[in-house]
Amino acid sequence: MNARSDVFVAINPNVVLDIPTFFRFYLSFSACKIGFMNGCRPLIGVDGRQLSGQFEGVLLSATALDRNSYIVPIALCFCEFETSESWTWFLRLLHESLGWEEDRTICFMSDRKKGGPTAFNKEWLEALT
C-alpha cells in the first residue's frame, strides 16, 4: 500500500451498454511523486509507446532522472490511441497529482508527436517544451 497514490480509470463514453468498457487508466505512486518533487530537477521526459498483443493501445509515461542519473517513474497511462485528447487527459492528471505550482517553471522533453504539443499548451502553461 502506498497512501496518496493516484489511480484513475475512465470508461468509454461512446459505448452504450449496461457493462462499462475500459477506456483509460492513470497511475502515479506517491513514493515516486515525492521522490521527483524532492530529489530531481524540474525536467520530465514524456513518451508514448504502441502496445501490441491481445490488448492493444498506447502506454504514455512520465519519467525523470534523480541525482545519481537513475530513472524515476512519475506516472503512466494506458489509453486507446495517442491523440491530443489522451495526452491532455494524462497531462492534466499529472499536473494535479504533482500539485505543481503555476509560477514554478518546469521543462518537458518529448518527441512532440501525435497530440503532445496541443496538450502541453492546455495543461502546463508554465512548461518549456
Image (tube, grey):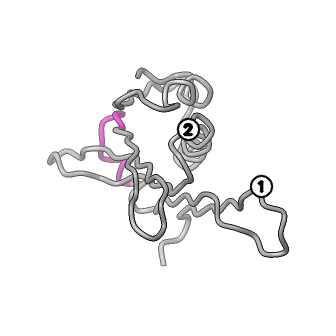
Residue pictured at 57% horizontal, 30% vertical:
119
Verify whether residue 10 appears in magenta.
Answer: no
Residue pictured at 68% horizontal, 59% vertical:
10
Residue 63 appears at what percent x and percent y? 34, 47
Res 11 → quadrant? bottom right
Tell me, for residue 83, which label it has, or none. 2
Which one is in front, 98 or 26? 26
Pointer 1 residue: 13
Residue 22 appears at what percent x and percent y? 65, 66
Which one is in front, 113 or 119? 113
Give the magenta part as a residue range. Answer: 35-44
Would you place residue 119 above or below residue 80 in this image? above
Residue pictured at 38% horizontal, 30% vertical:
108
Which one is in front, 90 or 69? 90
Amino acid type of the residue tagged 1 in the rendering: Pro
Res 91 → quadrant? top right
- Outermost residue toward the left? 68
Res 41 → quadrant? top left
Q: Mark 1 vs mark 2: which is more N-terminal? A: 1
Would you place residue 63 above or below residue 116 in this image? below
Residue pictured at 41% horizontal, 54% vertical:
34
Amino acid type of the residue tagged 2 in the rendering: Thr
Tally of numbered discs: 2
Residue 118 appears at what percent x and percent y? 56, 25
Residue 54 appears at what percent x and percent y? 45, 71
Horizontal side, residue 24 vs residue 54: left or right: right
